Image: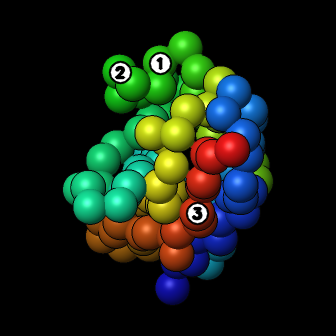
Amino acid sequence: QVQLAESGGGLVQPGGSLRLSCAASGSFFSLNVMGWYRQGPGAQRELVASIERGGSTNYVDSVKGRFTISRDNPKNTVYLQMNSLKPEDTAVYYCNAELNLYGGTYYRAWGQGTQVTVST
């Protein structure tokens, strides 16, 4: 079974920074795309940023220039550095990983979510 363990959420003032981490554990053959999604109050879950194993990244327009996604492949960990946070960034942030299990089966794993609140 594959598990994603998230950490780093919390309460921060507007303009502040937070760093989210997500570590994958369990038995799998390869860890491919990793990403962060978020779901704000009354909103649908949206992709915030993703990163491929080779390092190619993708961001939603609203976070470009403020958020940076990175990964440490030997540690099976993905990070999201969030700077210049705004109240509209308030949401539950979910880690996501697309991977292949032994035998080639495609599998998509989700973390439990971590709350990020941007407020005075």
Residue tagged 3: 115
Nearer to the camera, 100 or 56: 56
SS under mark 3: strand
Residue type at mark 2: give it. Asp
* Mark closer to the chain start, 3 or 2: 2
Q: Are marks 2 and 1 in contact (CB under 8 Å)?
A: yes
Nearer to the camera, 4 or 74: 4
* Mark closer to the chain start, 1 or 3: 1
SS under mark 2: helix
Q: Residues within 10 Å of mark 1 (few under 14, many from 20)?
A: few
Q: Residue at x 26, y 55 (%)?
A: 43
Residue tagged 1: 64
Q: Quadrant of the C terminus?
A: top right
Coloration of the structure image: rainbow
SS under mark 1: loop
> Residue 106, how many percent across, how many down?
30, 65
Q: Please state if 68 lies on the left or on the right of 43 as rendered.
A: right
Q: Kindly report the distance in space between the C-alpha atoms of the residues bearing marks 1 and 3.
A: 20 Å
Q: Please state if 77 lies on the left or on the right of 69 as rendered.
A: right
Residue type at mark 1: give it. Lys
Q: Please state if 47 lies on the left or on the right of 112 as rendered.
A: left
Kindly identify which numbered label has been placed on residue 61: 2
> Residue 74, how many percent across, how many down?
75, 49
